[in-house]
Image (spheres, rainbow, N blue to C red):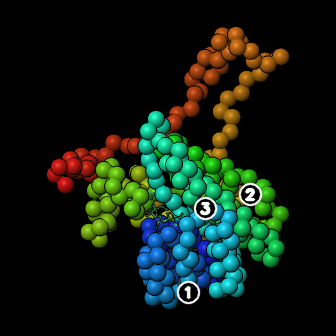
Amino acid sequence: MSLAGKVAIVTGSGRGLGLAYARELARQGAAVVVNDVDEAVAADAVRTIEADGGRATAVVAPVGSSEVARQLVQAAVDTFGRLDILVTNAGILRDKSLLKMTDEDFDAVINVHLKGTFTCAREAFGYFKENQVPGRIITIGSPTGQRGNFGQTNYAAAKAGIVGMVRTWALEMKKAGVTANAVIPVAATAMTKTLPYFQKAVEADERGDAMPAFFRHELGFGTADDVAGLVAFLASDAAAGITGQAIGAGGDRLQLWTHPEAAATAYREGGWGYQDLVENFDSLFGDKLQSVGEEFLPLPEELQPEPAQAR
Ligand SMILES: NC(=O)c1ccc[n+]([C@@H]2O[C@H](COP(=O)([O-])OP(=O)(O)OC[C@H]3O[C@@H](n4cnc5c(N)ncnc54)[C@H](O)[C@@H]3O)[C@@H](O)[C@H]2O)c1
């Protein structure tokens, strides 16, 4: 089952995960609209896809506004005659702890990830509906959006918001036969390469060696290519029945995430006043409070990062 005859847009696909998605979609037969703010990497991506035997064109523009969303869908239609698949992957980081985070840090991240996903999905869905295309919208979340992470207020808000939108779109798009899902990736890219925790895995990858099994298996951390198969699968006819899901991929690991639901429920005739909560909350829910943050397993001795000065 291939993607031959289909047309995809992948935002932020000049490098990293987006490039891996674009290449895999093209390998499976789709023509791809590459998008990035960096003109040179976008042009390189098109050349790479063409050298692989695929079809691609580039739109150099910053995802976020409705205008750029329109430009992307128009490019797919003008260049390749239609649109079937949208992957909203473009992203940036502006990490700072809450008190140091400026309004600009917050707005920049929300604009690219959350608003960019919203504007592109709205434009693509409008096209799908009007042209009766059983389209695919594949958004990109993050473990940070699912669990929270120190120093990532803006990014956590954007990524959790994306999964919230996917749950809503699964409902709104069902009748049109359009699916909307979120991929929760983890991979060695410019975004994660500098994290000391992953140093040994990134070094192995850069040497052209396989990443240590502990990273690939226990931590679900691998290469961008490890995530690309899931994106192509969700874009395919084989995934027609899958919508509203958040699916994690990285290294050797594939995960289906839960959506939040009530972890415990209690009733009291007349409702719960302040004093009722003071007296009962702990006994009702005290042992059921939810954990936050990702669990970072301790690295085995030989996989620990070297101290900065020794690098
Ligand atoms: N790398 C990971 O482990 C990881 C984990 C969770 C989520 N993600 C998400 O995956 C996506 C890709 O991340 P990556 O690691 O490949 O990052 P990356 O920095 O390697 O690539 C992101 C690309 O997006 C482009 N870009 C930035 N702003 C843009 C804009 N406004 N419009 C168009 N393009 C823009 C950049 O120029 C870059 O080429 C992001 O949404 C990121 O949040 C990555």
- Mark earlier in primary sequence (1, 3): 1
Above or below — where is 277 with respect to 9? above
Label 2 Cα crowd, 10 Å radius (few <14 / some 14-19 / many 20+): many
| Figure quadrant of residue 7 | bottom right
How many circles with numbers are drawn on the protein? Answer: 3
The residue tagged 2 is: 170
**In percent of the image, x 80 and y 77: which residue is there?**
131
Q: Amino acid at mark 3?
A: Gly
Q: Callout 3: 10 Å neighbours few (<14), some, many (20+)? A: many
In this view, the residue in front, 288 or 200, is: 200
Locate residue 84, reporting x and y percent.
Answer: 69, 75
Residue beneath disc 3: 64
196 left or right, relative to 288: left
Q: Image quadrant for the C terminus? A: bottom left
Q: Does label 2 point to a residue whose CB lies under 8 Å from ligand 1?
A: no
The answer to whether the residue labelled 1 contacts the one labelled 2, judged by CB atoms less than 8 Å apart, is no
> Is ligand 1 less than 8 Å from the beta carbon at label 3?
yes
Quarter of the figure that contains the N terminus:
bottom right
Q: Secondary structure at mark 3?
A: loop
Q: CA distance from mark 1 to mark 2?
A: 30 Å
* C-alpha distance separating marks 3 and 2: 22 Å
Residue denoted by label 1: 55
